[in-house]
Amino acid sequence: FSNDAKIKALEIKSYLKYYFKDIANQDIELALQFENQTIYSKHFTFDIVYKQIPILNATIKVNTDLQGNIISIKKENFDLAILDLLNPEQELKAWQQVNINQYANQFWAKDRVINTTTYKVFHLNHVPMIVIELHAWSKTEDNTLVLDINGNQLFEYNNLRYLNIDTL
């Protein structure tokens, strides 16, 4: 990201934390994931992060005009107040005892290489938990698998590529 984008992103983060009390919590951060400028506007996407762990599918998208005035804000997240019920340190410690490959092999071929693993905060029926997001990709496909601590599949996303173009 350019220095101008970083400065603008910091200003936007401060604005968002001021106006949205649920993200003003000291344990919640906004991580800039995307910044783009078009002819008439700029677009910023922030991941919402709790105690240094990204929240699955929780983002804030901000659009500004070229002078930096906010045009729109789209906030996608669940009720963040339930995060007080979560003990991330304890759950991450429990994840250290898990054989992630064994879990993944229930859903994917044993020879599939897991390229990245990321712990994420997720909620199921308003109960927050730490889940793991597994990514595997090759020249022909991208796969994402989200599992809970018991090895249950919560989500799976598969994108196939044809002629180096992602499809669903």
Image (tube, helix red, strand yellow):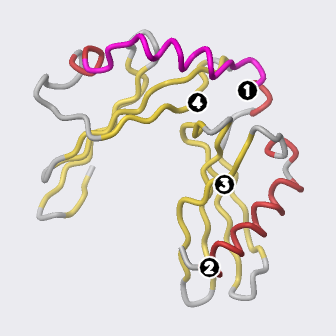
Is 159 above or below relative to 15? above
For the residue marked with disc 3, what is the amino acid? Answer: Ile
Ranked by sequence position, the earlier of labels 1 and 3 is 3
Nearer the observer, 125 or 133: 133
The three-letter amino acid code for the residue at tag 1 is Leu
89 vs 165, left or right, is right
The circle on residue 60 is 3
Q: Residue at x 38, y 20 (%)?
A: 153
Q: Provide the residue designation for mark 4.
A: 121
Q: Are marks 1 and 4 in contact (CB under 8 Å)?
A: yes
The residue where tag 1 is placed is 83
Measure the alpha-carbon separation of dots 2 and 4. Answer: 30 Å
Residue 147 placement (x, y as % from top left) = 41, 22
Q: Mark 4 or mark 2, which is nearer the start of the sequence?
A: 2
Q: In whole angstroms, how far apart are the C-alphas of marks 3 and 2? A: 21 Å
Dominant secondary-structure state across the stretch colored magenta: helix
Where disc 2 sits, the SS reads helix
Question: In terms of secondary structure, where does tag 3 sit?
Answer: strand
Task: Please name the residue that numbered disc 2 is placed on.
Answer: 3
Q: The magenta stretch spans which residues?
A: 83-101
